[in-house]
Image (tube, helix red, strand yellow):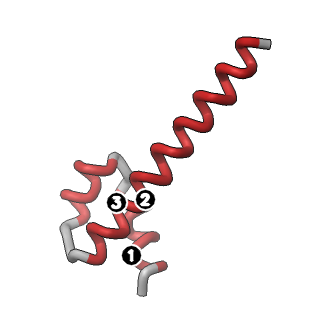
Amino acid sequence: MRTIAHQIEKRGEKRGMETKAIAIAKNMIRDKESIEKIMKWTGLSAHAIERLEQESK
């Protein structure tokens, strides 16, 4: 049971980190930062950032 709980906790942490990276990327897009800089600071792919850019229009 402990292993399953640990796996669930790790998945939650990963989702939280991804959610934070997306929020940071959206702010950087709004501030007109370059895709390269957003990739460096968030770890998101260029494709993911381009999708976020399209959503923000």
Residue 16 x/y as whole percent: 52, 45
Residue 13, compared with residue 56, is above or below; it is above
Mark sitting earlier along the chain (1/3): 3
Residue lying at 71% horizontally and 13% vertically, measured from the top left: 3
Q: State the separation of the CA atoms marked 1 and 3.
A: 13 Å
Residue 33 x, y percent position in the rendering: 19, 69
Q: Position of residue 50 (x, y in %)?
A: 39, 69
- Callouts 2 and 3 close, C-beta under 8 Å: yes
The secondary structure type at the circle numbered 3 is helix
The quadrant in which residue 48 appears is bottom left
The quadrant of the picture occupied by the C terminus is bottom left
Mark 1 or 3: in front is 3
For label 2, the SS is helix
C-alpha gap between disc 2 and disc 3: 5 Å
The residue drawn where x is 65% and y is 20% is 6
Q: Amino acid at mark 2?
A: Ile
> Residue type at mark 1?
Glu
Q: Quadrant of residue 4?
A: top right
Q: Badge 3 is on which residue?
A: 24
The circle on residue 22 is 2
Q: Which mark is residue 53?
A: 1
For the residues bearing labels 1 and 3, Cβ distance under 8 angstroms: no
Tell me the residue at 39%/75% (across/down).
53
* Between 48 and 10, the one nearer to me in the picture: 10
Q: Who is closer to the viewer here, 11 or 37?
A: 11
Say which element carries label 1. Answer: helix
